[in-house]
Amino acid sequence: MSENTLPAPFSLIRLDSVGSTNDEARRLALSGAAADLLVVTAREQSAGRGRRGRTWVSPPGNLHCSTLIRIDGNLATAAQLGFVAAVALVDAFRALVPGIPFTCKWPNDVLAEGRKCSGMLLEPVDKDWLVLGIGVDVAEAPPPGNLVYPACALADLGFAGTESDVLTAFCAAFGPLVECWRRLGFAPIREAWVARARGLGDPVVVRLEGETISGIFAGLDDEGALLLDQGPQGHRRILAGDVYFPAV
Ligand code: BTN
């Protein structure tokens, strides 16, 4: 175990170079070495994964971490942890880089001034563990080439700290929120996420597998689905997709 610089009850394993921290965390869980809120970080990833099969560019100086969270076998409920983490990231970023309007974008991204600075990949391991993988562009945003969404790094916004400062601030915010979620369920998390969401009530375009639809971003339902108001066609619940805010 690396020297633990994280607030209780988190513990830390710090690695140098790995394929993906999500795979390392998964290995620990399968070998029986997992602990609730054990965080695995790596200086760099050679095979960082994003949502929907994308690559996550993972150079040194950015934060790549995967947290093992004990769950109760209900994977739909466990997915709510992505919203818990997004709220914690927004609060951590707002404290670290004052004056920047950090917001949540469905499902689990964090935006800075409308550009993505953090993403999440949630992967269950059996029915007992969730791996919550988080990537934060601290020092460097990925090159614009293949991005599906404009990106920026915290350093571009004036942040002069390290990825380890970001992880500590995230854990300080995430710990109490996980506790709140375990005691009270999704309702207070949903309210906190909606209060930090970008573009509530605004037009959005949603790219689904094989279909692109548009409507008004009407909120989040009590299971974490995005609610899209399609006018006379009614509301549609979106469970997976990429959300874009068209330029007005
Ligand atoms: C996304 O926005 O597409 C999700 C990006 C998730 C990246 C993180 S970095 C740490 C963890 N390990 C991975 O391979 N992916 C996640």
Image (spheres, rainbow, N blue to C red):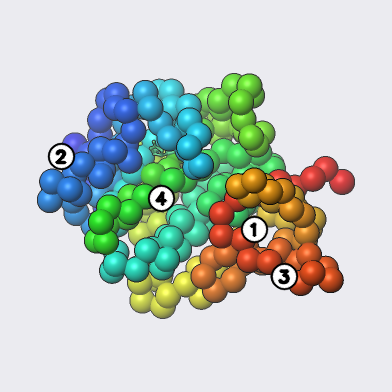
Cβ atoms under marks 2 and 1 closer than 8 Å: no
Q: Residue furthest left?
A: 32
Say which label, 1 or 4, has the lower sequence index. Answer: 4
Which residue appears at 25% of the width and 44% of the height? 26
Say which label, 3 or 4, has the lower sequence index. Answer: 4
Say which label, 3 or 2, has the lower sequence index. Answer: 2
Q: Amino acid at mark 1?
A: Ala
Asked which secondary structure carries label 2, the reply is: loop
Q: Please state which of residues 228 and 151 is positioned toward the viewer in this rendering.
A: 228
Q: Please state which of residues 103 and 27 is positioned toward the viewer in this rendering.
A: 27
Which residue appears at 74% of the width and 53% of the height? 213
Q: What residue does disc 2 label?
A: 1
Q: What residue does disc 3 label?
A: 235
Disc 2/disc 4 C-alpha distance (Å): 23 Å
Q: Amino acid at mark 3?
A: His
Disc 1/disc 4 C-alpha distance (Å): 20 Å
Q: Amino acid at mark 2?
A: Met
Q: Dot 3, how many residues are within 10 Å of its Cα: few (below 14), some (14-19), or many (20+)?
A: some
Q: Residue 214 at what x, y percent from top left?
A: 77, 54
Q: Quadrant of the N terminus?
A: top left
Cβ atoms under marks 1 and 4 closer than 8 Å: no
Q: Amino acid at mark 4?
A: Leu
Mark closer to the observer (1, 3): 3
Does 65 appear above or below 105?
A: above
Q: Residue 89 at what x, y percent from top left?
A: 49, 50
Side (left or right) of 19 relative to 247: left
Q: What residue does disc 4 label?
A: 122
Asked which secondary structure carries label 4, the reply is: strand
